Amino acid sequence: MATLTFIGHSTFTLQADDGAKLVIDPFLTDNPVTEVTPEDLEADFILVTHGHHDHVGDLIPLASQTGATIIASYEIASYMEQKHGCTVSPHHIGGGVSYPFGYVKMTSALHGGKLDLPGAEGFTTVPGAFLIDLGEGQRFYYAGDTGLSIEMQLLKGKVDVAALPIGDRFTMGPGDAVTAVEFIEPSVVIPFHYDTWPEIEQDVSAFVDAVGGLADVQVMQPGAVFEF
Ligand code: NI
Ligand code: MN
């Protein structure tokens, strides 16, 4: 069983069958919906979709505390290697790498590229998403921050569990997220990136109704665990 924990807003942890611990987009200290601190988390790998503060706010302390390998775009990986001495595994859009726990492919996202980290001038990148294949029935797609894109149709048949942003304003809203579900056809959908601040408040029950029979919607409160 893969164990997925929703920390809150953009941040998830994922433990694979082999025990590998992944943290996705660590945002803790300034995250109003969680009390979790970097010291509370273990990580063998930290996956980063893009450089906005609500995805990398605790990247540097978590990386230094855990010694985890950073899986990110070439630019973010280079920044973490050159500025912070981290072990990194650079990717770019469309490229995958086999890790002991599974295969990770970086896929496209429609979003901004600023890297909100000290001394990061020159490391600006394009944002991404991750398709994390932990095995049969354990193919997890973390969309990161993105608008709806036609490229999501390429994921059809390749995703068991999809985490999709629904907050609107900075990412897809609920309506476009339903279209993303139609494109991707996952078994399970997990909405995130909403209700953290007033600007991205959403009626998640309306989203659940709108998805209807297309997929099973798992509404995870911060701290909730889902196994698949
Ligand atoms: Ni963002
Ligand atoms: Mn965000």
Image: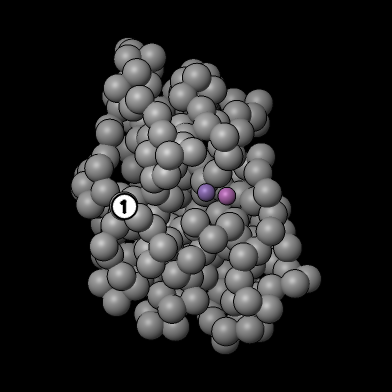
Residue 57 location in percent, x, y? 48, 66
Q: Which residue matches tag 1? A: 33
Residue 140 location in percent, x, y? 40, 43
Q: Does residue 175 appear to the left or right of 1 in the view shown?
A: right
* Viewer can see residue 56: yes
Q: How many numbered discs?
A: 1
Q: Residues within 10 Å of mark 1 (few under 14, many from 20)?
A: some
**Which secondary structure, mark 1?**
loop
Q: How is the protein colored in the picture?
A: one colour
Q: Quadrant of the C terminus?
A: top left
The image shows residue 175, relative to residue 218, as above or below, that is above
Write the residue at 58% across / 39% down: 170
The image shows residue 89, relative to residue 10, as above or below, that is below
The image shows residue 166, relative to residue 183, as above or below, that is below
Residue farthest to the bottom?
A: 85
Q: Amino acid at mark 1?
A: Val
Write the residue at 46% across / 24% down: 174
Residue closest to the eye, 95 or 88: 88
Q: Mark 1 CB in 8 Å range of ligand 2?
A: no
Q: Does residue 82 appear to the left or right of 24 in the view shown?
A: right
Write the residue at 29% across / 57% down: 34
Residue farthest to the right?
A: 122
Write the residue at 31% across / 52% down: 33
* Viewer can see residue 2: no
Residue 224 location in percent, x, y? 21, 47
The image shows residue 168, relative to residue 111, as above or below, that is above
Q: Does residue 92 appear to the left or right of 133 in the view shown?
A: right
Splitting the image into 4 quarters, where does residue 91 fall?
Answer: bottom right
